[in-house]
Structure formats: structure tokens, C-alpha cells
Image: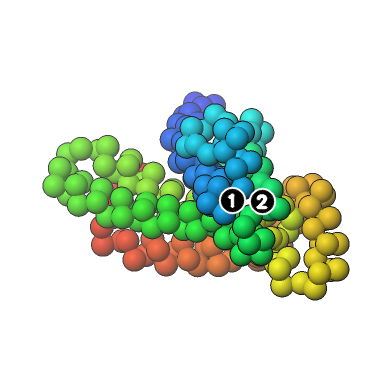
């Protein structure tokens, strides 16, 4: 019986992950597209020339960061009863030297992905309400409960992506914003950390999860507030 329950739980976890993965991919691809589009508007066509100014996910997907890492995180945390996942797309190549106004262009382009994720969270909130109204009009259609669950996931993931990218650790977007607050000499030393940033990021996430939990506390509060505000439109029943 224990083995059977374990298999059922694993199958349910796999099904949930396969439902969530497209939402995650859309969110990270839209984030990178926003960088590419705003860079193009500011005078840098590097991403455009390399085929990254597109919503087609294939040029943006990184096999590890977009698929393997989210899967590892999801199944590693499933046993706790509170599965969690996270991922990223391939960073869009940008040459700030091409911007018409270097500082302003860098600030706009660096902020674009964060703004895109917040807009996606708001869009998912609107979808949550619309799905709730449709589900009450057709109460026998269970698909609305599943769709509302996906909208809820979209809200949570995009709030997480927005705040995570605000962390001032190279190469995250927040590091570009923080750079402009530093004196020029300090800023150059700070930017050189970018070559080690991804390693530091992975090591701290793996060995110091409590630090990241503290840093991302606003994510839980903002997500909780958003979902609480949406409760009047929530459909009853398991998700």
C-alpha cells in the first residue's frame, strides 16, 4: 500500500510539474524578450541580430536553467508537501555601448524584465478573476479549477522572478541598477564580480537557503496579499 501511495504521489507531482513548466517558460522567455525589445529601442540591435527579439522559446531556452534546474528543485522539494520551482532563460546579449544614452538606456533595459514579470503577474490575476466568473457560470466544468490553479502559479512565479532579479548580485538585473549608485571606481570592481556571480548564486542558494528566504520575504507577503485579494473569485474544490 505504501508503495502504491508513493507511486500515486509521484505521478501527481509529475503531472503538476508538466502543468507548471509552460507557465515558467513563458515567464522567463517574456522576461528576456523585454530586455531584447527595450535594448533595440535604446539603439542596441545585438539581440535582434542574434534572433533573440522573439517570443519563440527555442532561442531563449537553456537546457539546464530552463528545464533541468526547475525539475530538480520541484522533485527535491515535493517530499516536503510544499513543492517549489524556479528557473531562468539564456541571458539576452546586450552591448550598452550602443545605447543612445548609456546610463538611461542601461537603467531602462535592466528594469524591463522585472516590469514584464510584474505585468504578467497582474495579467494572471485578471485571468484568475475571469476564470472564476466562468467557472461559476459553468460549475460542472472541472477544467476551470485547473486553469485557475495555473493562473495562481503564474502570479506566484512572476512575483518571485521580479523580486529575485532585483537582488543586486551580478549578473542579476538588480546589479545593473545598483551599479549606477556606486562611485565609478567601485562600480568597475563591482561589475567584475559578474564573472563569478552565477557560481555565487548557486552556492548560496544551495548552502545558505535561509539567507535567500530572508531576502525574498517580500515575495511571500506580496503573493499572499495578491491571492488573499483574489479569494472572492476563487473556485471551490481541490486544485
Q: Secondary structure at mark 1?
A: loop
Color style of the picture: rainbow
Q: CA distance from mark 1 to mark 2?
A: 6 Å
Tag 1 residue: 43
Residue that lies at the very extreme toward the left in this rendered image: 137
Above or below for 93 versus 189:
above
Mark 2 surroundings within 10 Å by alpha-carbon count, few (fewer than 14), some (14 through 19), many (20 or more): some
Residue located at (55% from left, 47% from top): 40
In the rendered image, which quarter is residue 228 located in? bottom left
Residue located at (20% from left, 46% from top): 135
Residue toward you, 75 or 41: 41
Above or below for 141 versus 206:
above
Q: Secondary structure at mark 2?
A: helix
Q: Is residue 76 visible?
A: no
Question: Could you tell me residue 35's position as x and y percent?
Answer: 56, 49
For this view, does 106 lie left or right of residue 203? left
Question: Could you tell me residue 4's position as x and y percent?
Answer: 49, 26
Residue toward you, 56 or 97: 97
Of marks 1 and 2, which one's residue comes earlier in the chain? 1
For this view, does 7 lie left or right of residue 129? right
Residue toward you, 238 or 24: 24
Q: Are marks 1 and 2 in contact (CB under 8 Å)?
A: yes
Residue 98 tag number: 2
For this view, does 74 lie left or right of residue 12? right
Residue located at (31% from left, 55% from top): 126
Residue located at (51% from left, 33% from top): 57
Question: Could you tell me residue 63's position as x and y percent?
Answer: 64, 30
Amino acid at each position: 500500500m505504501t508503495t502504491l501511495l508513493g507511486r500515486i504521489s509521484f505521478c501527481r507531482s509529475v503531472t503538476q510539474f508538466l502543468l507548471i513548466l509552460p507557465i515558467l517558460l513563458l515567464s522567463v522567455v517574456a522576461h528576456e524578450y523585454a530586455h531584447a525589445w527595450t535594448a533595440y529601442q535604446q539603439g542596441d540591435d545585438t539581440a535582434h541580430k542574434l534572433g533573440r527579439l522573439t517570443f519563440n522559446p527555442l532561442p531563449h531556452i537553456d537546457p539546464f536553467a530552463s528545464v533541468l534546474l526547475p525539475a530538480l528543485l520541484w522533485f527535491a522539494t515535493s517530499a516536503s508537501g510544499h513543492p517549489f520551482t524556479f528557473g531562468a532563460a539564456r541571458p539576452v546579449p546586450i552591448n550598452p555601448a550602443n545605447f543612445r544614452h548609456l546610463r538611461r538606456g542601461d537603467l531602462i533595459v535592466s528594469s524591463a524584465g522585472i516590469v514584464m514579470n510584474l505585468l504578467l503577474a497582474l495579467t494572471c490575476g485578471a485571468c484568475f478573476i475571469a476564470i472564476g466568473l466562468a467557472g461559476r457560470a459553468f460549475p460542472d466544468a472541472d477544467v476551470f479549477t485547473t486553469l485557475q490553479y495555473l493562473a495562481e502559479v503564474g502570479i506566484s512565479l512572476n512575483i518571485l522572478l521580479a523580486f529575485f532579479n532585483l537582488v543586486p548580485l551580478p549578473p542579476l538585473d538588480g546589479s545593473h541598477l545598483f551599479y549606477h549608485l556606486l562611485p565609478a571606481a567601485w562600480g568597475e570592481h563591482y561589475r567584475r564580480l559578474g564573472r563569478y556571480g552565477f557560481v555565487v548564486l548557486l552556492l548560496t542558494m544551495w548552502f545558505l537557503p535561509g539567507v535567500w528566504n530572508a531576502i525574498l520575504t517580500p515575495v511571500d507577503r506580496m503573493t499572499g496579499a495578491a491571492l488573499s485579494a483574489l479569494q472572492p473569485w476563487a473556485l471551490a474544490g481541490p486544485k
